[in-house]
Image: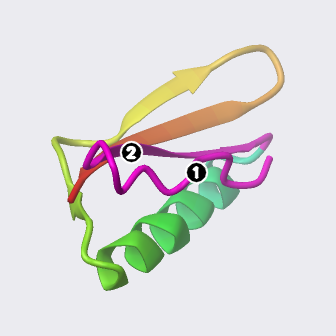
Amino acid sequence: MANENKDSSDSGYDIVRSASPSIVSATNKLSTWVTMKIELGWIPLGPPLMHKDDEKYYFFQAMTK
């Protein structure tokens, strides 16, 4: 699952997401997306959240501008 967020510059709030069957891969993907957003002036809001279903790990990070 690619990052599905759209640039929410108008609202100043965004959620970065990643998903993978591997927890390591999901964390690495989220880290990459968050780093890219930080370079664009976004700031993480709180800790990342994780959800696990039967097949995948999902990570979410709220960001503010």
The stretch drawn in magenta includes residue 6:
yes
Left of 56 or right of it: where is 61? Answer: left
Could you tell me which residue is drawn at 65 percent across and 34 percent down? 57
Q: Give the structural element (helix, strand or loop) at label 2.
A: strand
Q: Quadrant of residue 55?
A: top right
Q: What are the residue bounds of the magenta stretch? A: 1-21
- Marks 2/1 in contact by CB < 8 Å: the verdict is yes
Q: Which mark is residue 21?
A: none
Q: Residue at x 25, y 76 (%)?
A: 41
Q: Which numbered tag is attached to residue 14?
A: 2
Kind of element beneath mark 1: loop
Going from N to C along the chain, the mark reached first, 2 or 1, is 1
* 2 on left or right of 41: right
Residue closest to the far top: 54
- Per the model, the C-alpha gap separating discs 2 and 1 is 8 Å
- Residue furthest front as drawn: 10
Kind of residue indicated by mark 1: Lys
Q: Quadrant of residue 37?
A: bottom left
Location of residue 32 with respect to 60 vertically, above or below: below
Which residue is rendered at x = 68% and y = 46% of the image? 4
**In the rendered structure, which amino acid carries the disc numbered 2?**
Asp
| Residue of label 1 | 6
Q: Position of residue 60 (x, y in %)?
A: 46, 38
The residue lying toward the viewer, choosing from 31 and 39, is: 39
The x and y percentages for residue 34 are 41, 65
